[in-house]
Image (cartoon, helix red, strand yellow):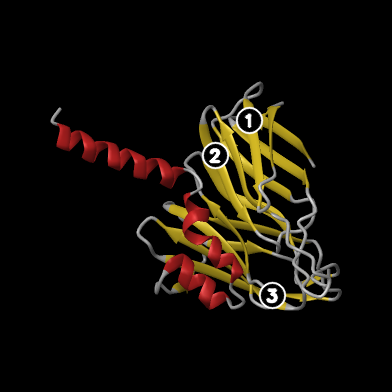
Amino acid sequence: MGIKAIAKAKNDVATVKLLVKHPMQMENKEKNQKPKFIEQLTVTHGGKTVYSMYPSMGVSKNPYIKFMLKGAKSGDTITVMWKDNTGESETKDFKLR
Amino acid sequence: MERRSFIKFGGVFALAGTAAYAGFLEDHSKAFTFEKSDKAMNNLYGSAKAASSDKVTLTVPDIAENGAAVPVTVATDLKDAVMMTLFVEKNPYPLIAAWEIHEGTIPEFSTRIRMGKTSDVTLVVKTKDGKLHMAKQQVKVTVGGCGG
């Protein structure tokens, strides 16, 4: 597990690119393989939720996510949080460049 | 404040609190388990039907060489958009992802998705008035990504 981010602010708009290390494992009834996937990914900025995504097994392994945020400037902190369907979760702060 | 109205007040706050966090999964996690997109749509939006809109933009490749990671960008110019949902009609579970749209965030999101075979991909955007707007495009898949 692990979250990588490239987050840059320019002209009041921040572009955030995230790469989350996660298997996003599909269900496979033949192999008796249980699904394990991120079911919620949230990003907050200044105490406000700015991004809420609810992925499924249909999202690729090691999810890549990109979005743009208005009213953010260089030096601001964003907090990325995900949790998966097995209860595992991770939270990490990133500073906007 | 009278006790009765205080209780009422508290109740409203408690409801608002749950709606703001994890509310979507509480109400709609089942939508991800349906094997037909119309059933998932019904779980998410009830009987509302989506109409094609040029203000909904779905950017996908015409041909995906690798179904395990198909780049997708979902976007809308609709001012009052509150939610976006993405479907791959022929995947085992068609509902791929949902996004809540927050004030201050540009409603243009990119990610990578799995596609088992050639299929229509549909993006549905819900606006504040409850109306549904959509865009659809076919993606040809040469090597499927759902073989697991």
Marks 3 and 1 on same chain: no
The image quadrant where one finds the N terminus of chain A is top right
Please state the horizontal and vertical placement of residue B25, each as a whole percent of the image: 53, 55
Counting other residues with Cα less than 10 Å from the Cα at mark 3, is it few (<14), some (14-19), or many (20 or more)? some
Please state the horizontal and vertical placement of residue A42, each as a whole percent of the image: 60, 42
Q: Which residue is mark 3?
A: B92
In the rendered view, tell whether residue B1 sits above or below residue A28: above
Mark carried by residue B73: none
Circles 1 and 2: CB atoms closer than 8 Å:
yes
Please state the horizontal and vertical placement of residue B55, each as a whole percent of the image: 51, 61
Find residue A17 and report its image quarter: top right
Find residue B105 and report its image quarter: top right
* Alpha carbon separation for disc pair 3 and 2: 30 Å
- Of the numbered discs 1 and 2, the one sitting upstream in the chain is 2
- Residue at point 59%, 65% (across, down): B32
The answer to whether residue B81 is left or right of residue B29 is left
Q: Which residue is mark 1?
A: A78
Q: Which residue is mark 2?
A: A50
For the residue pair B53 and A50, the one nearer the viewer reads as: A50
